[in-house]
Image (cartoon, rainbow, N blue to C red):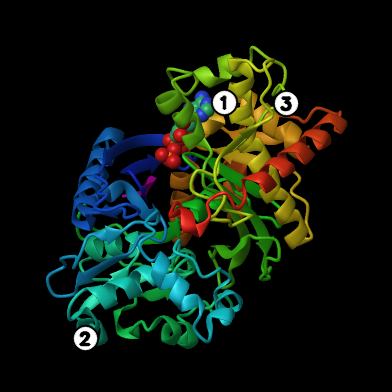
Amino acid sequence: MTRRFVLSIDQGTTSSRCIVFDRHARLAGMAQRAHRQHYPRSGWVEQDALEIWRTVEKVVPAALRDAGIEAGDVAAIGIANQRETTVVWDRATGVPVRRAIVWQDVRTEALVERLREMPGAERITALSGLPLATYFAAPRLRWLLDEVDGLRERAERGDVLFGTMESWLIWNLTGGEHVTDVTNAGRTLLMNLATRQWDEELLRFFDIPRAMLPRIEPSTGDFGTARVAAPGVRIGAALGDQHAALFGQTCFAPGETECTYGTGGFLMMNTGPEIVRSRHGLLTTIGYQVGPEPVYALEGPIAVTGSLVQWLRDIVGLIATAPEIETLASTVDDNGGCYLVPAFSGLYAPHWRSDARGLLIGLTSYVTKGHLARTVLEATAWQTRDVVEAMNADAGLRARSLRVAGGMAANNLLMQIIADVLDIPVTRPLVTETVSLGAAYAAGLAVGYWPDLQGLRRNWRAAAQWLPHPDRTRRDEEYAHWQRAVHLSIGWARPADGTRH
Ligand code: ADP
């Protein structure tokens, strides 16, 4: 029997999706199911890990049916997942001790403030590559250990287990493998970026019992064999979703850069085999590891990109559907002098200011609805430029082009604006399911379904490309206006207002 397909599971923030790919990276079958979000208090975001597992258990056979194949036709499973979402479950019963705490959850803000004052806090970035922030998993795990009665004792005995989503899914799929990969472990604040193992100093700092932690594997590694959903199929790979996107876009060479534009925007630049420490507000992370050595990356998350378009649609009501923004913005040639900094809950990379708030500036009676629509699209482009400039400065490399995917990448006008603003070509691939494809690629490599990276590169095909307009003068002037607007947005939410997030 030849195993002709590879299957990927993308366990995302709002849904779980399973896609079957063939050897040419063509989509052969797909199934998707959403799960619920719980908001028990302001700033808290939770998900039911058992519900998520049940959706995965259903979408895998559904995708196989959609492709008209059976588990026996599948060479390997690859998993990509929402990162930093924290699950703790009972080793004996498999029942989560609480709902999963989702990556957007900021309940640990006070805890993080306290930890920042502790001796050793200044070493965290050097060891983990990340700033101490609510965004990552370790403070959530620490919060659970402090809050749930008796949990610490059970954790010390190894009776309860910690994992991010891929660990939780693999444990359920295999019936008990407790394992994670370097890209996910690298987002906990507990992994040493150089050794790629749990770091004793970080574990002590966050006071996390080692007995509850999974084993760390490379992104293509030994994750066991599925016993349910696709019985008998080896799990060949696991990666955080944005890392899978980098891999799926075949950004295998230093300097190659991609961005996934969805609700938020996530840029990643391959920086090669050496760790590049950021001095310009980026995260240092493992891009992926498919062999003995990892590829490092710089990452710049942007909190608000597509969600600004949703805001214009649902709250402001200026458009009825997201694609309409392109039509409206095309009624004008420029932004009419307007800039919108969408710091709705502060700014992420490269500014990292939780005290920034949204700002619309440059209004005159000349400004029309069209200008506003254009200003909204430009906000994504200018934020991208902020991150790319930081990447170029940190890496000592220049991004020579940007590969894009995600819901917003459907907007042709926006892609042209990004090319102009960055002054580099922007390319959209034929297969825009880059997260799923990246997980499939890594899994396929693990079992020899695809021979090597070169083979994967050959599968990558551009569907569309936008070249920058040759005149840079106006762009640079406008970028200076944008930078002034960002400056003005910072510091608006003072802690005393009680509006600080
Ligand atoms: P996520 O994976 O984060 O849920 P998606 O990749 O599905 O997001 O992208 C959805 C986002 O893209 C939404 O925020 C939506 O407003 C935005 N979006 C979708 N289509 C367009 C478009 N044609 N122009 C601009 N934004 C769009």
Residue 233 on image: x %, y %: 29, 57
Q: Which residues are magenta?
A: 1-9
Looking at the image, residue 335 lies above or below residue 118: above
As shown in the figure, which amino acid type bears the numbered disc 2?
A: Glu
As shown in the figure, which amino acid type bears the numbered disc 1?
A: Asn
Return the mark for residue 320: none
* Disc 1 versus disc 3: nearer the observer: 3
Quadrant of res 106 = bottom left
Identify residue for label 1: 411
The Cα–Cα distance between marks 2 and 1, rounded to whole angstroms, is 52 Å
* Disc 3 versus disc 2: nearer the observer: 3
Q: Secondary structure at mark 1?
A: loop
The answer to whether the beta carbon of the residue marked 2 is less than 8 Å from any atom of ligand 1 is: no
In front of the other: 461 or 143? 143
* Disc 2 versus disc 1: nearer the observer: 2
Q: Residues within 10 Å of mark 1 (few under 14, many from 20)?
A: some
Identify residue for label 2: 153
